[in-house]
Amino acid sequence: MNQRNFWGSIKVITLLVCASGVAWFGIGLVGKQQQVEQFERANDLLVQQKYSSAITAYDRLLATNIVKHHLIWINRGYAFLGLNRYQEMLQSCSTATLIEPEAATGWNCQGEALYYLKQYPDALQAFDKASSKNPQEATFWLNKARVLSSLEQYEQAIAASDRAIELSTQSTVDNLDRAIAFNQKGQNLLKIEQYQASLTAFEQSLVNSPNYLSAQQGKGIALYELGNYQQAIAVFEEILERDNLTKEQKGMSLLYIGVSLCQTQKTTAGEKVFQQVLQLTTDPQSQEIAQKGCGIK
């Protein structure tokens, strides 16, 4: 049975710079204070997910700013990301790297834009630059792992995840970052059919973030592949108790419950589950498996 990936969104660094962070503008005190206030207002709009208004605010600041500070361009890029306008995000982030080539966050921003544009080799180069500028930032290694997986370089992706895990355990990084790193490792281990190792990685992810859906799904898949069908069913039944699951997410969980029931010779129960899958999912592969039912090879 072919597996599917269940990745979270690529990790984003949004730079919300306080007043001291923009003291580098090098202009008079009054003008500096005005720009600080404008920058903070624009950042507040970004945090509130008012992306169009944030872009307008950043553009207004850039039009009057004596020094085109790279952080303005980076945050402007992330505002475009919120609107799924990836080409414009790339242009803004690339401008940041031209203004300040040594800023790791600018290269990371550019890499994310390239990733969303599916320009994976170029994205990898950008993330490589970000991690070379600041090799202690776990997020850059998380992003490298994600793009390496998209390039089907699974062993390298696992190594990048391991580096992110190492860095995250050495710092006070948010547990969610650590959970993402373990989850990424688990997903890539699934790809190379190292199911026991992937199960361990998913369990570590859930230690750091017990409600992490992607890691729960990965754990269930690993258990299924290891032949632990009853445990797999229990994991997917627990997932189905969640609120706000999409139809596709419900369909995927039911699909694994169905195939697990088939493996334990509970054919009638499995066929009933497959009927629910057909009502929920539009994924062609899932529909094919559900239609074949317990006769699938």
Image (spheres, helix red, strand yellow):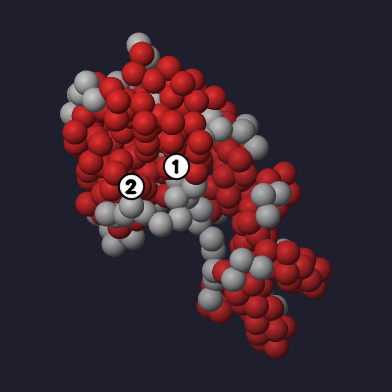
Locate residue 174, reporting x and y percent: 33, 60
User: Which residue type does callout 1 highlight?
Assistant: Gln
Locate residue 260, reporting x and y percent: 27, 27
Q: Secondary structure at mark 1?
A: helix
Q: Quadrant of residue 154?
A: top left
Q: Sequence-wise, which precedes: disc 1 or disc 2?
A: 2
Viewer-closest of 170 and 222: 222
Name the residue rendered at 53%, 76% in the picture: 18
Q: Residue furthest bottom?
A: 30
Viewer-closest of 151 and 225: 225
State whether residue 143 appears in this view: no
State whether residue 276 appears in this view: yes
Q: Quadrant of residue 123?
A: top right
| Left or right placement of residue 23 versus residue 202 in this view | right
Name the residue rendered at 57%, 44% in the picture: 112
State the mark number for residue 239: 2
User: Which residue type does callout 2 highlight?
Assistant: Ile
Q: Is residue 208 above or below residue 181?
A: below
State the mark number for residue 249: 1
Instruction: Report if the CB atoms under discs 1 and 2 are less than 8 Å apart.
Output: yes
